[in-house]
Amino acid sequence: MKTQIRQQNGISILELKGKIVGASVSELREVLLPKVEDADAPRVLLNFEDVRMIDSSGLGVLIEAHILAKRRNGRMAAIHIGKHIKNLIVVHRLVHLFEHFDTEEDAVSALSA
C-alpha cells in the first residue's frame, strides 16, 4: 500500500493506493493515527479511489481512527469508495462511521465548515 498525504484548508487528505491487507494495515496505522492524534480537532479525508481491497484488520484501523477523531471533536470522511469496500462496510454495519462524499471538493467544503 502507498499513501500520499496533502493538506487543504486544514484537512489531511490521504490518498490510499493498493490493497489494505496484511502488513499494509500496519502502514495505514502508522500514517493515519498520527494525523488524528496530533490535531486538536482533526479533519481527515480518506480517498479510496485506488484501493480495491481491505480486510477486517484494515477496517479495525479505520474504526480506531474514527474513535480517536470523535474524542478530539474531529471528523473523518471518505470519497471514492469502491463496490467491494462499500459492501464490506455495509455488511459490518459501519456505514454510519464515515461521512461520504461524491467529490473531493464537496468533502473539503463540508469538512472546512
Image: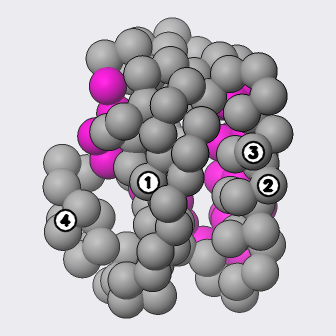
The image position of residue 93, as x and y in percent, is 54, 21
Decide: is 44 above or below 66. Answer: below
Which quarter shows the N terminus? Answer: top right
**Which labelled disc corresponds to residue 27?**
3
Mark 1 = which residue?
Answer: 15
**Which labelled disc corresponds to residue 30?**
2
Q: Residue at x 72, y 33 (%)?
A: 24
Do callouts 3 and 2 mark residues in contact (Cβ within 8 Å)?
yes
Query: Could you classify mark 2 by the number of other residues whose Cα lies within 10 Å: few (under 14), some (14-19), or many (20 or more)?
Result: few
Q: CA distance from mark 4 to mark 1?
A: 16 Å
Q: CA distance from mark 2 to mark 4?
A: 27 Å
Q: Does residue 93 appear anywhere in the picture?
A: no
Q: Residue at x 68, y 22 (%)?
A: 21
Nearer the camera: disc 4 or disc 1: 1
Q: Residue at x 18, y 55 (%)?
A: 103
Question: Element type at marker 1?
Answer: strand
Q: CA distance from mark 4 to mark 3?
A: 27 Å
Query: Could you classify mark 3 by the number of other residues whose Cα lies within 10 Å: few (under 14), some (14-19), or many (20 or more)?
Result: some
Mark 4 = which residue?
Answer: 106
Asked whether 71 or 51 is in front, the reply is 51
Do callouts 4 and 3 mark residues in contact (Cβ within 8 Å)?
no
Amino acid residing under circle 1: Glu
Q: Bounds of the magenta span?
A: 57-82
Query: Could you classify mark 1 by the number of other residues whose Cα lies within 10 Å: few (under 14), some (14-19), or many (20 or more)?
Result: some
Amino acid residing under circle 2: Glu
Sequence-earlier tag: 1 or 3: 1
Residue 92 is inside the magenta segment: no
The image position of residue 107, as x and y in percent, is 28, 64
